[in-house]
Each structure stands twice: as structure tokens, then as C-alpha cells.
Amino acid sequence: MNSIYGYSEDMLKQYLISLGEKPFRSSQLIEWIYRHKISSFDEITNIKKDLIKKIKEDFIIDSLECVTYQKSTDGTCKFLFRLSDGNLIETVLMNHDYGYSVCVTTEVGCNMGCAFCASGMKKKLRNLTTSEIVLQVMMVSKIAEVRVSHVVVMGIGEPFDNYDNVINFLKIINHPLGLEIGARHITVSTCGLVDKIYEYSNFDLQVNLAISLHAPTNEIRDKIMPINHAYKIEKLIDAIKYYIEKTNRRVTIEYILISGLNDTAECANKLCDLLHGLNVYVNLIPYNEVIEKPFKRSKKEDMVNFFDILKKRRINVQLRKEQGGDIDAACGQLRSKHMNK
């Protein structure tokens, strides 16, 4: 049977039409599932019993098993969930002054192989289904007893490597009768799958785009991000320009600062040259060190100097406040630690 959490309103409409039912029943179903958070279809009171019986034959209301979770002193929580096939994934809850944000995983493992990242230490086994991504938001909200207002698709895996399921997930969590998370409160991050950035430019929801850049030159990016061998920075910048022109939306540039690698004044100036004139916002990120990796976080003075150079050259930039530094905060750390045990 299929998980009900994997079906958007359009998909439910088609299902109901195939049964000879009125399409408006799809809105009723969505409202019961996401607003009332039912645990059984029998709780539905405004749909006839024979239709409920048929729905129960075709769908399940499932959940994820929470294996463990860690809570930081700053309120950040990292959850380790077990899927129905036994695989493990991570989800992070962050508390901001504007509300609660959830960072979701899209794949079991990751094949992108970024040298600094814990996620890539365990190779990709499979894509997550739409329902498994939706359930991360549902489960975190339930366990923490909070209203999730923002979602970032930046957990384990490359979202655009699981494109169709991610797009369906975005439609479901944005639905006004569902989780009702505003499109502008949702951000999808990619390490640079250029062809998918062009496709994403035609997506009809105003969901934000973030690019994991992490280097201002091909020479540096080749060393730490294998994706750069397939799509050089020049091609990536062309895709970003197309996205901005097509959507009239700003792009976030994610840039992890790694000591002695990409945090020099020269790198800062080259980054300014690369991004000059683009409607972008640079998010400088202190590196969460991974014990199995040789990389170290930048010194505080180097991070501040990097920030100052961008600011002086009129690049829209922020130095992100560190969250979860006292727990296994980096993507894939908690999962890897649990699997290694």
C-alpha cells in the first residue's frame, strides 16, 4: 500500500476521479491528514464509509521511528530516524527568532562526495520517497511539539538528484490546507546540478534556491567538490544567471569557511569578482569539523576578515550564527556514528 503522505492534492484528485468520486474530496482528505493529524482514516467524519473503506485498502498512515536525538544548548535538535526498510536518516530542528525551521534529508547516503562533508562517507543507497521527506517535518513537529514555519532541503543527499520526489514534497508542505508552509519560507539547496537548476527555474512555486559553492575558483572547487568536474563554475554561474532572470528571485550562495583552503583574502576578492552584479546573498558558514576529515574551521579573525572584504565590495553577506556546535551538527555525523557502532 502507498503512504498517504506521498500524495499531493492533484494526485489525490486523480485517484478519487478514478473511483468515480468528486474531486473536492481530495481537499477534505488533506485537511484531515495535515490539519487534524489523524492516525486512522476512521477518524474522518465527512466522507462516506464505503469510500473510507476503499481508501484504507489503498493507503496507509505511516510514521518514522525515532531512534535517538540530540539537543544542543542553543535549542537545536538533531533526530535520527529509522525508515521502514531499516535505513537511517537525519533531520534537524532549529529555533530562530522568526520561528522553527526543519532541515530535511532527501537520500539515504550521498554520492556527491564533497571532501569536507560527513554525508558522503556513506554512499547513496536510494532516494527517499516523497512521504519519507514529508514525514520528517511531521515527526519533528510532533516530537518537539512546535509549529514548523520554515523548511530547508539541505540534509543528507543532493535534493536535485531526487528531483521529482523533492518537487512533490514542496507542493505538499506548501498546500494551504496542509502544513501551509509559505513558498518563500522554503529553500532548496544544490551543490550544482546545472541541468536541474534550469528545470527548477520553471517551477511554479516561489521556493528559494541556494547554491553550495564553497570555492571561488575551479582549482579549489575541483579539490573538494567532485561535481565541479562535471559542471565547472562558469556553467554554474550561467545557470544562476538564468534562474535569476527567469524568476526575478535572489539566490543564496552557501560558503563554508575552511582554514587555509578557501578563507584567504585572495579567495574573498575572487568570490567578489565571481558574484559581481548578481542578485545573490552570501551565507558564510563556520565549518563543523568532522573527525574523519582533515579540514579545520577558519579562525575567527579570518572569518571576520573574509566577511569584511565582501561587505566593503558591496556583496550582500552574513556570517551565519553557529548552531548545534556541541552536538553532531554536521550533515551525516550522527548517522555515521550510529552506523559505525
Image (cartoon, rainbow, N blue to C red):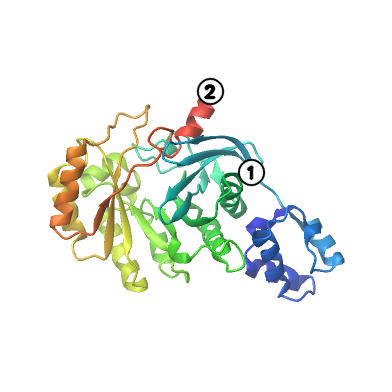
Residue on which the image places disc 2:
341
> Which numbered disc, 2 or 1, marks the residue closer to the eye?
1
Q: Is residue 149 left or right of residue 58?
A: left
Please report the residue visible at 40 percent of the width from the left and 68 percent of the height from the top: 201
Q: In this view, does 288 lie to the left or right of 14?
A: left
The picture quadrant where one finds residue 298 is top left
What residue occupies the far top of the structure in this picture? 341
Relative to residue 243, is residue 101 depicted above or below? above
Q: How crowded is mark 2: few (under 14 residues within 10 Å), some or many (20 or more)?
A: few
Above or below, comparing residue 60 to residue 109 in the picture: below
Q: What residue is at 26 percent from the left and 45 percent from the top? A: 221
Q: Say few, some or many: other residues with alpha carbon within 10 Å of mark 1 (under 14 / 14 to 19 / 20 or more).
A: some
Q: In which quarter of the image is residue 56?
A: bottom right
Q: Which amino acid does label 2 sit on?
A: Lys
Q: Residue type at mark 1?
A: Leu
- Sequence-first tag of 2 and 1: 1
Residue at image coords 62%, 53%:
131
Q: Where is residue 176 in the image (x, y as percent from the top left)?
A: 58, 69
Q: Position of residue 125 (x, y in %)?
A: 54, 40
Res. 64 mark: 1
